[in-house]
Image (cartoon, grey):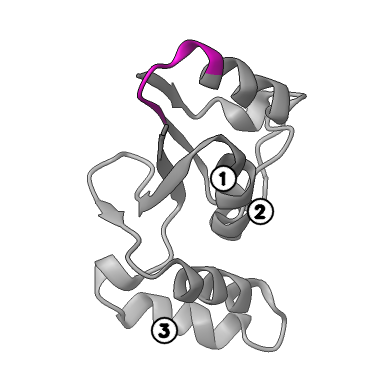
Amino acid sequence: MVVSVEVIEHVEDPALFLAQLSRIARQGMSLSSPNWTGSRCNWPYHLREYTPKEFFEVLSPHGKVTLFKGTSDGCEVFRIKYPAIHFLQNRLRVFPVTALPMRCLNVILPSESRIHSSNAAWVAFG
């Protein structure tokens, strides 16, 4: 297994990076990255941050992807059971007309249903 924590957003060629991780891993890869929906790429050393859907799409060619979300400190981590709903929720959070209502909704939702600051995934091979 290969573990990559908060690295992919610093890489110039993510496709090549993931291909090399896939080459050396036997069973799968565990990766995490900031959720662009929450941070909007404010870090000067991040070349690219991913929305949950983009993160899923960049990982999908390498195996079966199981998505997770959580806080940046790792104290809360939740498996994303319904990716399509999670993708829509994140999209509505950045759309100008729905951004404010989604922000308000995010405060009152239970933690497992909220938009969180970190994306994570397990990519299983075979």
Q: At 40% from the left edge and 76% from the top edge, which residue is drawn? A: 106
Residue 96 pos. (x, y %):
72, 81
106 or 88, nearer to the observer: 88
Looking at the image, is 92 positioned above or below residue 72?
Answer: below
Nearer the observer, disc 1 or disc 3?
A: 1
Q: Residues within 10 Å of mark 2 (few under 14, many from 20)?
A: some
Range of magenta residues: 23-29
> Where residue 93 sits: x, y (%)?
58, 74
Can you identify the residue that label 3 sits on? 105
Residue 101 horizontal/vertical position (percent)? 53, 88
Q: Quadrant of residue 32?
A: top left
Q: Is residue 40 left or right of residue 24?
A: right
Q: Report helix, strand or loop for mark 3.
A: helix
Identify the residue at the far front of this view: 126
Residue 46 location, quadrant: top right
Tag of residue 7: none
Task: Pick whichever, 3 or 75, lies toward us.
Answer: 3
Mark 1 lies on residue: 60
* Total numbered badges shown on the rendered structure: 3
Q: Nearer the viewer, residue 43 or 5?
A: 5
Q: What's the mark number on residue 40?
A: 2
Kindly identify the residue that appears in the image at 35 percent across and 24 percent down. Answer: 27
**Dot 1 and dot 3 residues touching (CB under 8 Å):** no
Q: Amino acid at mark 3?
A: Leu
Q: What kind of residue is marked 1?
A: Ser
